[in-house]
Image (tube, grey):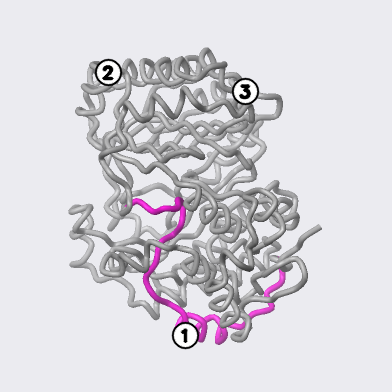
Amino acid sequence: MIKPHDGSAMDISDEKIRELVERFSTRGPRYTSYPTAPQWTEKVDSNVYREVLHNHTDPSPIALYTHIPFCAKLCLYCACNVRITGKQDLVERYLDALKRETETVAGLFQTRPKLAQMHFGGGTPTFLTPDQLGGVIDSLDANFESIPGAERSIEVDPRVTTVEHLEMLRSKGFQRISMGVQDLDEQVQVTVKREYSEEQLTQFVADARRVGFEGVNLDLIYGLPFQTEKTWKRTVDSIIAIRPDRLAVFGYAHVPWMKPHQKSLEKFGLPSPEERLSLAIQCRRAFIDAGYFAIGLDHFALPSDDMAIAFQKGTIHRNFMGYTVQDTESMVALGVSSIGDFPAAYVHNQMNTDKYIEQIESEGLAITQGHQLSKEDRLRRRVIVRLMGNFHILPAKIEQEFGISFEEHFASEILELQKYVDQGVLRRDDSGWHATVEGTFVVRNIAMIFDRYLETDREKTERYSRTI
């Protein structure tokens, strides 16, 4: 069994983390895809997608993502594709379009697709009424076949999610629920316009567990206005008391040129890079001390959770839904702005909700851009995805899958990898390269070694976030 390191051991000091940031932090992709979105082109359209689906003959189960963009209110930190509305006619038109897209996509496969994973994101999927959301799930189940034990998960907002929602979701086989908590401090909540009490959250998690949800995921965000180590500690301590199965802790991405509403937060002041790092280190130590496995810099899981088990086995997968234990080769994505992921291509749906509806109504699909992968793209994607998910590079597996000599094909990359070995963030043995505990913090830097597009596209790197 491959075990990169013991994720539950806090065997790296705060000072070491700060030193890693100073030494390695630069700008680079998050590698939820390779090639990354700047390389995608409008030449990949709905006609290309039809060919991809028709030629997809791999019988392996796939993942399915469905995007519900609607929210009742706008959270000021949000960088997701959302639509604030109270218009039920718009919602109904969207659901009709989603049903048609579902039928179109499923009908283009040569055989009925089998699902290993179904996930709803947004927006707020539970903005829909239980009947509306149940109807979407029924449409998916009518067109796709879930294998026994398939994972079903959904993102919710506790402020609009009722017990009736929870009971309906459990009745349709959903086992995992994910909530964006972000912060429990009242001043922070009021500032970013996401207000609810700790008592409400605690009761909601209790209700989810009572109706039978097996996995509860909570998300936090650091780097928001008015966050301090003192207030952040209260939030983290409260989350530990709730005891979610998984946690994701993200640094706030301030991108007002993409999301103009975020600019309103600037008048309150944002934590400095040094303060952000302190908040990240603070919660990492607290969660590990509370018994969570640290999976990279920003994910945590209880030892009993499937993700912690997969992490120890070295079988975590990474796609547009983030880290997942379902190692599916392909992902169908439905709804506005969603991104499908196939061995042959990435396909990106229309970003505008009204235009998405119109395009689906006229042609059944709404692809606006994407990327057709060459053999070299697929090879490098495999290396990067496994590195990002499991923190290792295993040449024998790559050679077997792609029929290459890893040493010859990646001769220059191996020289770059040695530099990281020399700096103590990679360890090399007979099986390949493995990130040390320190190396999990710089895994994006290491992945950039295998990104051939960065060499010709350096001027675009400023659009990316910091690697640490």
Q: What separation in Å lies between label 2 and label 3 (alpha carbons)?
A: 27 Å
Q: Position of residue 255 (x, y in %)?
A: 26, 60
Q: Quadrant of the N terminus?
A: bottom right
- The magenta segment is 8-37
* Residue 27 among magenta residues: yes
Q: What residue is shown at x 28% (from left), y 68% (from top)? A: 462
User: Which residue in the rendered view is the most extreme toward the top?
Assistant: 142
Who comes first in sequence, dot 1 or dot 2?
A: 1
Amino acid type assigned to the residue bearing label 3 in the image: Ser
Between circles 2 and 3, the one closer to the viewer is 2
What element does badge 2 sit on? helix
* Residue 130 among magenta residues: no
**8 or 101: nearer the viewer:** 101
Q: Which residue is mark 1?
A: 23
Q: Position of residue 68 (x, y in %)?
A: 37, 31
Amino acid type assigned to the residue bearing label 1 in the image: Arg
What element does badge 3 sit on? strand
Q: What separation in Å lies between label 1 and label 2 (alpha carbons)?
A: 51 Å
Q: What residue is shown at x 41% (from left), y 53% (from top)? A: 35
Q: What residue is shown at x 34% (from left), y 61% (from top)? A: 253
* Residues at marks 1 and 3 touching, judged by CB atoms closer than 8 Å: no
Q: Which residue is mark 2?
A: 363
Amino acid type assigned to the residue bearing label 2 in the image: Glu
Q: What residue is shown at x 35% (from left), y 49% (from top)? A: 195
Q: Which residue is mark 3?
A: 146
User: Can residue 70 be spotted in the picture?
Assistant: no
Toward which corner of the image does residue 348 lie, by quadrant? Answer: top left
Q: What secondary structure is the stretch in magenta mostly built from?
A: loop
